[in-house]
Image (cartoon, helix red, strand yellow):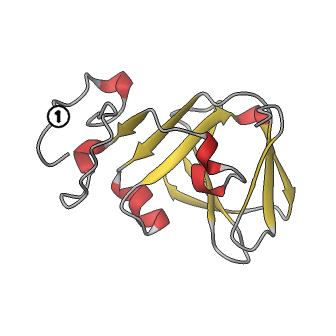
């Protein structure tokens, strides 16, 4: 894959993006907000510098899901597309599954595992954090993880 020309789209193809450069990180997020925004047990994001992303085709819709948080989505099919927060002002977090080649992005970590649903069982060996790596050491592995 040419990492200089990454692209992705929503389900219907109306909302598209192009990304230049390498991702900053790839993570599974288990927080309640991301679960509700995606209607999934967890969301997988690929973080990029905000300046590296260009929306093409139709502009995505926007929703302020909580103070300082902006979520973008396709206004036609409803696919969630990105997450941005004042907490990480120079980043945009794109949903890994929206990339044209999502298999190219191997997750590196689980964040907000302190909010993980109890019936999710993942034995991928990745570090798990109660919140984020900046907020404390990894959780001790448990039988339920």
Element at label 1: loop
Residue shown at 76% from the left, 37% from the top: 1
Residue shown at 26% from the left, 52% from the top: 116
Quarter of the view holding residue 58: bottom right
Q: Is residue 8 above or below residue 45?
A: below
Q: Is residue 54 above or below residue 34?
A: above
Is residue 115 visible in the rendered image? The answer is yes
Query: Residue 86, percent across and down?
Result: 55, 37
Residue underneath mark 1: 141
| Frontmost residue, 97 versus 86 | 97
Is residue 93 visible in the rendered image? The answer is no
Instruction: Residue at the far right: name it.
Output: 57
Quarter of the view holding residue 108: top left
Query: Residue 22, percent across and down?
Result: 70, 28
Q: Is residue 12 above or below residue 107?
A: below
The C terminus sits in image quarter: top left
Quarter of the view holding residue 3: top right
| Frontmost residue, 78 versus 84 | 78
Query: Residue 124, percent across and down?
Result: 33, 40
Instruction: Residue at the far bottom: name it.
Output: 76
| Count of marks placed on residues | 1
Would you say 54 lies left or right of 114 here? right
Query: Residue 84, percent across and down?
Result: 59, 44
Q: Residues within 10 Å of mark 1 (few under 14, many from 20)?
A: few
Q: Is residue 23 above or below residue 15?
A: above
Would you say 117 lies left or right of 28 here? left
């Amino acid at each position: 894959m040419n990492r200089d020309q990454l692209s992705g789209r929503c389900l219907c193809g109306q909302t598209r993006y192009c990304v230049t450069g390498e991702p900053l990180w790839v993570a599974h997020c288990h927080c309640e907000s991301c679960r509700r925004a995606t209607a999934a047990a967890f969301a997988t994001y690929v973080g990029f510098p905000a300046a590296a992303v260009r929306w093409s085709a139709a502009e995505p819709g926007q929703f302020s899901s909580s103070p300082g948080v902006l979520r973008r989505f396709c206004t036609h099919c409803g696919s969630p597309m990105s997450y941005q927060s004042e907490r990480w002002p120079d980043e945009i977090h794109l949903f890994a599954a929206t990339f044209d080649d999502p298999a190219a992005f191997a997750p590196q970590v689980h964040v907000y595992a302190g909010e993980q649903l109890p019936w999710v069982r993942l034995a991928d060996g990745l570090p798990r954090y109660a919140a984020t790596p900046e907020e404390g050491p990894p959780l001790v592995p448990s039988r339920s993880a």
